[in-house]
Image: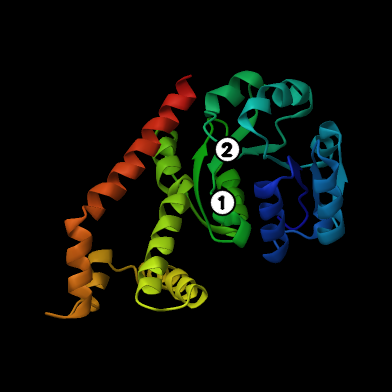
Amino acid sequence: MKNRNIGFIGAGKMGSALIKGIIKAKIVTHENISASDVYEPFLRDLQAKMGIMVSTDNIVIVQKSDILILAVKPNTLGSVLADLRDYITSDKLVISIAAGVPLLTYEQALLKDTRIIRVMPNIAATVLEAASGIALGKNATPEDLKITLEIFSAVGTAVQVPESLMDAVTGLSGSGPAFIFPIIEAMTDGAVLEGMDRKSAQTLAAQTVLGAAKMVLETGMHPGELKDMVTSPGGTTIQGIHALEEAGIRAAFMNAVIRASERSKELRED
């Protein structure tokens, strides 16, 4: 990776987060990264903060790159692919983070031997804590997968899944942060009701969620087992658990993921 050039088509929030993560993880240096965007203020800000090469011309970025990351909106992707088709040769790896766009779209729009990988990261990439699902196109190689995992592990955690499960990834980790934010807010409100100031309550609520997630990831233990570790007989925690179960918390979260996944399928089929 050290001598490979990574180019970004699109330098918005997700593109910028990936650039920040790649540089922080020292996957490549800023000299090996370039980006294009139609919005020049994004480019000027990136150039000033990250020292990367920028351009408003997508073709310039493609020609410079060994690895091309498409970080554009799905509704503009078609025209971008049409413009770049003849410049994306088989020696370039193409990684797309356009939400909901299947691999078949790229395989039909680009040259037949193009190496494509589809990735679904989430908004937590902006704080280098993304959860990303990776699906390989038919021409992608094991080395391409290794490169993609390295890039997206720089901004969080990444796992490979069959493309058939990318809608589930969208419903789980893509939409998931928005399911957790109201939980943090509600926990904060509960502490405020008990007399705590909001700033302290929100800090403790957010850190509690972060700490619990870290325990799951680092211990490898089942969440139920971890829950039992802090649930004493007749104690405070079991009372809270009982209140959550009365409210149907498990069904609510399951349904949130299922419905978001179903909507992802509907949007793809529109």
Q: Secondary structure at mark 2?
A: strand
Q: Nearer the viewer, mark 1 or mark 2?
A: 1
CA gap between label 1 and label 2 equals: 19 Å
- Image spot of residue 47 (x, y percent): 86, 54
Find residue 230 and report its image quarter.
Answer: bottom left
The quarter of the image holding the N terminus is bottom right
Location of mark 1 (residue)? 123
Q: Quadrant of residue 38?
A: top right
| Quarter-of-image position of residue 45 | bottom right
User: N-terminal of the two: label 1 or label 2?
Assistant: 2
Task: Using the rendered image of the protein, determine whether residue 217 is visible from the camera's viewpoint.
Answer: no
Percent coordinates x, y for residue 124 in the rendering: 55, 56
Counting from the top left corner in percent of width and height, residue 72 is at: 68, 36
Spot the residue most to the left.
234
| Of residues 204 and 20, the one drawn nearer to the viewer in this rendering | 204
Q: Which residue is mark 2?
A: 117
Query: Where's residue 14, x and y in %?
Result: 65, 48
Q: Nearer the viewer, residue 6 or 82?
A: 82
Q: Nearer the viewer, residue 116 or 217?
A: 217
Q: Does dot 1 land on a helix, a strand or a loop?
A: helix
Image: 81 above or below 255: above
Q: Is residue 193 left or right of residue 57?
A: left
- The relative height of residue 3 versus residue 60 in the rendered view (above or below) is below
Q: Which residue corresponds to the image point at 67% horizontal and 54% vertical from the top-left?
A: 17
Instruction: Look at label 2 and name its amino acid.
Output: Ile
Give me the residue at 38% from left, 36% from top.
261
